[in-house]
Image: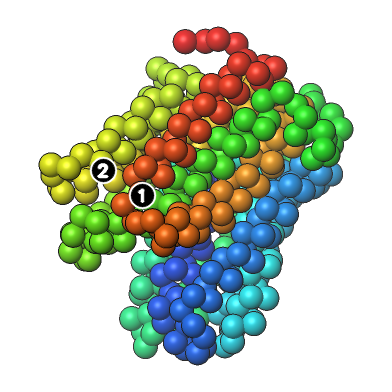
Amino acid sequence: MSFLLIIIYLAFISLGLPDSLLGSAWPVIYKDIQVPLSYSGIIFMIISGGTVISSLNSDRLTRKFGAGKVTAVSVMLTMIALFGNSISNSFWQLCLWAIPYGLGAGSVDAALNNYVALHYASRHMSWLHCMWGVGATIGPYIMSFALSRNSNWHLGYRLIGLIQLTLTILLFVTLNRWQRSENNDEEKSEHLPLSRVVRISGVLEIMLAFFCYCGIEQTCGLWAASWLVNIKGINEVKASAFASFYFLGITIGRGLSGFITYKLNDKQMVRFGEIIIALGILGLIQPWSDELSLFSLIILGLGSAPIYPSLIHSTPELFGRDASQSIIGVQMASAYVGNILVPPLFGFLAHFLSLNIFPYYLIVLTILMVLMHERLRKNAKGEEDAG
């Protein structure tokens, strides 16, 4: 494994580290700064808005400065935001620091995903996104350690900030390695504006596929425990544990997916994941066993695992290397929009109907995702019917 690839693996861990901090610390933060519990949604919206903006501009930035510099500066922005949070004592300050965090997270996500899609095999994309899961798992443990020290959430942000600072220094020190790799690339194409990107055959389909996938992921993360408690009558502690196992399933599944890619290509990996998701949803719907409903959340996580990295890795193949950075930026933006809109829409529908619609809501999203993926494979210009 090359030294640069090791740095990229570390960067993916760093991407995940801050992602779950707000949720794990908010039960303490909102009391400390004396705001309503629901205000975490405002901060989340600011972060998500920043990620959408930076994702859509990632192509222009990466072409001008290179993936290495964009990654280094983006991680530096998240580091600054984390240290800003560590000295914040009011809601408006947390909102202020959410801006650089969102802008940094979106740029580094799009730049790294495209770089890996262009330069490395599919297995590395799966394993790298597994590393994101490792970071997202470690983050709450670090915050938990900090909270055990007199409920000091500031310390939690500071500790993660120090990790990001270390990675920022490492990225700037190793910029020459990125530049040598990028200088070897033959493609020197022009930046594609959004108006041109969305007219490329297959782009709208892949945007909707990402929208649906991230909608499934975030809806499971936000509403699975509530569905288990209120519809299945499962104990709150047990329901919470198994709801978190959905993300454990994603992390383990991505680790396993890297090995499966030796046998299956990206198209087959996505279809394989869709089939397993369908089996997981059937397990939720079945009326005979509550234990099977719990276990089905893990199945859902395992099915979700290969879809996101395989769709990203297939982008240069489907649309050409020249257009991949522009399209991956749009994909990331679509994913974040799915994160923002789909879970609240479920909450709105469940309020007027019932939480019982949870698995059926997932069915609709899954069917739409499958249809978009199949249309994508027929319409995208680079597709070859392999396997």
Q: Do the numbered discs 1 and 2 sit on residues whose CB atoms are within 8 Å?
A: yes
For label 2, the residue is 284
The answer to which of marks 1 and 2 sits earlier in the sequence is 2
Q: Is residue 31 above or below residue 25?
A: below
Corner quadrant of residue 66: top right
Three-letter code, disc 1: Phe
* Mark number displayed over residue 358: 1
| Relative horizontal placement of residue 74, taking residue 20 as reference (left or right) | right
| Residue 170 quadrant | bottom right
Return the x and y of residue 72 as percentages of the image width and height: 68, 54
Q: x, y percentage for residue 162?
A: 54, 69
Q: Secondary structure at mark 2?
A: helix
Give the Cα separation between the discs numbered 1 and 2. Answer: 9 Å
Residue at figure coordinates x 25%, y 41% from the top left: 285
| Residue neighbourhood size for the residue with mark 2, other residues' Cα within 10 Å, grouped as few (<14), some (14–19), many (≥20) | many
Task: Look at the image and tell me whether residue 306 can be seen.
Answer: yes
* Residue 18 image offset from top left, x and y in percent: 51, 63
Q: Is residue 239 above or below residue 196?
A: below
